[in-house]
Image (cartoon, rainbow, N blue to C red):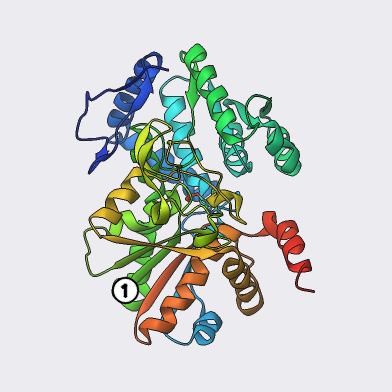
């Protein structure tokens, strides 16, 4: 495909050297239409009011900021607070973005939403928001993933979405993305392509970041109510990076607040079987953006691995690469094993079963708490709840018995 970097808005879509829009010519009108609509709507009081009203009355915002006393005692150091995105409707932070983009689509006059999904979480979030806002929804999913995630396929269908099984290529997420893009090119007039993380061509990373920033804005207010000050450290897991950037973004100008993104260390960095893009990737172009990717020396995308499907992505949001390069944020990795331990620890000590993705952040937060000692406050974003992961955890835990 012929790729060009359209730079009609040269500054807006760039994070240092990263981001931009590397897209086929046929998509340029659609991307331009989206960028223009968003620029207008983000200042529109009615749009802001609608968004915030759905977030509170439909999705249940604000989510609590919970002081995890038992976890704090167990870790033996800094105080650990949990930002409870697991309590959001749908069970994860994805709902924030799906509602925001469905509202945007509606205001743009689109009647049909398409999305692609790997594990199915984003497909479910999209189906949910589309259903609530009366939009038609079709989700592309690789045949292998359809088989592995039968429950989520059924969930999407219950929510009124149509799931298209993709049988080309490796029959996984990247093939589903290709099909979704093909659909968008053909049906751009009435169709909105809803991307699930801070990835893809500009303006998607910016739009998704803005919609997820409610997480960090609430943390700021809630911490101030509890401690009368800012947190010392923020920790969030990074797949594409949307819950992390949503947590970090409102704090970026407060240089005293340290930011930690936790990637999937899989079977360990040396094994090569991980999804730690910022830790082990290099510059490249993927899914319409310049970013870090996990690639071999010929530029082929490497096979990634993580116990958590939501972190298993060979790229990462471009703004995270920039934050890493300017050393504003730190990126670390936590292995499958460590995440699994944290999953059990949080369940046992606090009565909260976290998503395996979020368990990565919890694991690193415990390590940090021990290291930095008392009289410091760490906020961990608990991106989702773990109900979806119970079977996977059972399979892993059996080995130990
Ligand atoms: C999808 C998902 C993630 C990873 O996505 P980000 O864009 O990196 O936030 C993390 N946690 C949960 C619970 C998810 O569903």
Indicate yes or no: mark 1 CB to ligand 1 under 8 Å: no
Residue ID at (53%, 51%):
311
Question: Which type of secondary structure does the marked residue at label 1 adopt?
Answer: loop
Q: Quadrant of the C terminus?
A: bottom right
Q: Which residue occupies the foreground of this view, 12 or 137?
A: 12
Q: Where's residue 360, x and y in %? A: 53, 64
Q: Quadrant of residue 220?
A: bottom left
Q: Where's residue 190, x and y in %? A: 49, 15
Q: Tell me how many marks there are.
A: 1
Residue 34, can we see it? no
Q: Where's residue 312, x and y in %? A: 55, 49
Q: Is residue 310 above or below residue 175?
A: below
Q: Is residue 170 left or right of residue 317?
A: right
Extreme residue toward the front, this view: 297
Q: Is residue 378 above or below residue 137?
A: below
Residue 8, can we see it? yes
Q: Which residue occupies the foreground of this view, 10 or 128?
A: 10
Q: Which residue occupies the foreground of this view, 231 or 20?
A: 20
Q: Is residue 24 left or right of residue 302?
A: left
Residue assigned mark 1: 232
Q: Quadrant of residue 133?
A: top right
Residue ID at (75%, 38%):
147
Q: Residues within 10 Å of mark 1 (few under 14, many from 20)?
A: some
Q: Quadrant of the N terminus?
A: top left
Residue ID at (63%, 35%):
172
Q: Is residue 182 left or right of residue 374?
A: right
Q: Where's residue 306, x and y in %? A: 58, 54
Residue ID at (33%, 32%):
202
């Amino acid at each position: 495909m012929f790729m060009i970097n359209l730079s009609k808005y040269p500054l807006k879509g760039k994070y240092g050297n990263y981001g931009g829009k590397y897209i086929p010519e046929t998509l340029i009108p659609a991307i331009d239409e989206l960028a223009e609509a968003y620029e207008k709507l983000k200042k529109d009081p009615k749009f802001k009011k609608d968004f915030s009203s759905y977030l509170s009355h439909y999705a249940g915002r604000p989510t609590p900021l919970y002081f995890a006393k038992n976890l704090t005692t167990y870790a033996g150091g800094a105080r650990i607070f949990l930002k409870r995105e697991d309590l959001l409707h749908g069970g994860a932070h994805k709902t924030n973005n799906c509602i925001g983009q469905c509202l945007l689509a509606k205001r743009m006059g689109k009647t049909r939403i398409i999305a692609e999904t790997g594990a199915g979480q984003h497909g479910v979030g999209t189906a949910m928001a589309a259903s609530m806002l009366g939009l038609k929804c079709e989700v592309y999913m690789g045949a292998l993933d359809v088989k592995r995630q039968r429950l989520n396929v059924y969930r999407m269908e219950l929510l009124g979405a149509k799931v298209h099984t993709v049988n080309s290529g490796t029959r996984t997420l990247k093939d589903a993305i290709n099909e979704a893009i093909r659909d968008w090119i053909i049906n751009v007039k009435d169709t909105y392509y809803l991307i699930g993380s801070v990835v893809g061509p500009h303006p998607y990373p910016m739009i998704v970041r803005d919609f997820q920033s409610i997480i960090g804005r609430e943390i700021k207010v809630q911490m101030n109510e509890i401690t009368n000050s800012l947190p010392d450290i923020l920790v969030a897991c990074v797949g594409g990076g949307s819950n992390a950037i949503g947590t970090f973004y409102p704090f970026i100008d407060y240089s005293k607040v340290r930011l930690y993104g936790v990637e999937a260390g899989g079977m360990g960095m040396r094994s090569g079987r991980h999804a730690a893009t910022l830790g082990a990737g290099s510059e490249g172009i993927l899914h319409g953006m310049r970013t870090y990717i996990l690639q071999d020396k010929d530029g082929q995308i490497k096979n990634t691995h993580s116990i958590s499907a939501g972190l298993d992505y060979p790229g990462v949001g471009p703004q995270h690469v920039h934050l890493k390069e300017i050393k504003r944020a730190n990126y670390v990795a936590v292995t499958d094993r460590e995440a699994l331990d944290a999953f059990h620890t949080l369940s046992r000590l606090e009565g909260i079963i976290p998503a395996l993705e979020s368990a990565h952040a919890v694991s690193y937060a415990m390590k940090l708490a021990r290291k930095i000692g008392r009289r410091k406050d760490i906020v961990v974003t608990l991106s989702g709840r773990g109900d979806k992961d119970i079977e996977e955890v059972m399979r892993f835990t059996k080995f130990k018995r």
